[in-house]
Amino acid sequence: MIFLLLPSRAGGFSFLNGCRRGFNYQQKFNLVNVKLKWVKDKALDAVVAGQGDLRATCILISIISSAPKCCLPIYRLTPHRGQLGLPHDLKLSTFIRRYPTIFNESHILDSGGTRVPCFQLTSEALNIHQQELHILEQNQMDLIGRLSKLLMLTRDRTLPLQTIDQLKWDMGLPYDYYNTLVPHHPDLFSSIRLPDDRIGLKLQIWDDRLAVSQLQKNVAFQQKEDVKNGCLAFPIGFTRGFGLKRKCMEWLKEWQSLPYTSPYFDASHLDQRTDVSEKRIVGVFHELLHLTIEKKTERKNVSNLRKPLSLPQKFTKVFERHPGIFYISKKCDTQTVVLREAYDGQQLLHKHPLVDIREKYAGLMRSGFLDRSRGLYKDKTSPNLEGSSNIVGFEEKSDCNSHSEHVVNDRISDPF
């Protein structure tokens, strides 16, 4: 495999010399109005289904485990509800009780003498969490590299913390990365006050070794002539039964042969009305998805990246225009963009160690949910679980839209 290093963002690199020579040609190559249909991909839909509950559970695990006694009353967990992505009509306590193999429930008296539920982790969940902490420690430099590359994609090497927070789950960053990971690298990161008064994170040092896109690393799979000319092609794959018209096939073939502009390279010289500019936008999101550990993220997570990434209006249209590169899953009442090349059916081709941890959590969640549905937890508070199927492994029975159909007749006497 050939690695191409970039001397600097401003100076460019030899790989793009051919692109610069063909600059006039690029500017004349206008966008072709090609519309490709969306075709359902059951395998990738199954990958997305269930992630809502898994993500919310992992966040709660992180919050509870960081508490002084690893136990928190429900009123201490409620302020974090907005980060969980749960339906408005689903009580937080109902969600937590759904997974008795993850959370143990006890009760305490609040300052007014009211009996309130308190939750801690089961021994099984604690065991997995300890494995997770060990993996995070082992892979700290990998995570630092991912965060650095994310900031290097931006114009000023800076992003608001809110924007990073939207991507931290997908990138495998710890829940409290800003307090536990960033402070250990003051030479790399600094907190700044943005013009809109938000707090941002700035990368202080540009690292040439990181400024190499995944597509450039994979030049071994490209034609030698294309590599020489800087015209790298993206891996393409379509859902079975996807019919491409001849006009679309010709356009795609010609588009693939256009010069590739690295997402780490200054692209201000490109005319945004051209296909070459669109190929650069596709390259930005191709790289961004490669920075995630499961090669997917919700579309809304990137919707506010237009200015930091120097992208044109309606930039997310590239997801629809290139269904052979990106798949948009509409499961769980949202749109999730998946990088097709990263999967063989439902299987992720290259698994990050944190993915294995999440699969262990998902397995524990499944067993607890099934045990409760079989009545093995009748001696405890038992909320109505009817319609609850947003769990990894239950996709074939539900499209994850059943959350909104929860009947909140929980048979719970307390107000939580």
Image: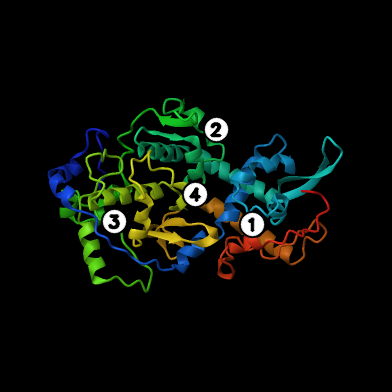
Depicted 131 relative to depicted 7: above or below: below
Query: What residue lies at 84% left-to-right and 44% top-to-bottom?
Result: 115
Is 54 situated left or right of 227 in this image?
A: right
Q: Where residue 313 sits in the image (x, y, percent)?
A: 35, 47
Q: Position of residue 80 (x, y in %)?
A: 64, 42
Q: Which residue is mark 1?
A: 364
Marks 2/3: CA–CA distance: 36 Å
Upstream in the sequence, badge 3 or badge 4?
3
Q: CA distance from mark 1 to mark 4?
A: 17 Å
Q: Looking at the image, is mark 2 or mark 3 earlier in the sequence?
A: 2
Which residue in the protein does label 3 denote?
Answer: 234
Local secondary structure at mark 1: helix
| Distance between mark 1 and mark 2 Cα atoms | 27 Å
Give whichever of discs 1 and 2 has the lower sequence position.
Answer: 2
Q: Circle 3 — which element?
A: loop
Residues at badges 3 and 4 in contact (C-beta under 8 Å)? no
Tag nearer the camera, 1 or 2? 2
Query: Dot 4 corresponds to which residue?
Result: 353
Numbered badge on residue 109: none
Q: In the rendered structure, which amino acid carries the disc numbered 4?
A: Pro
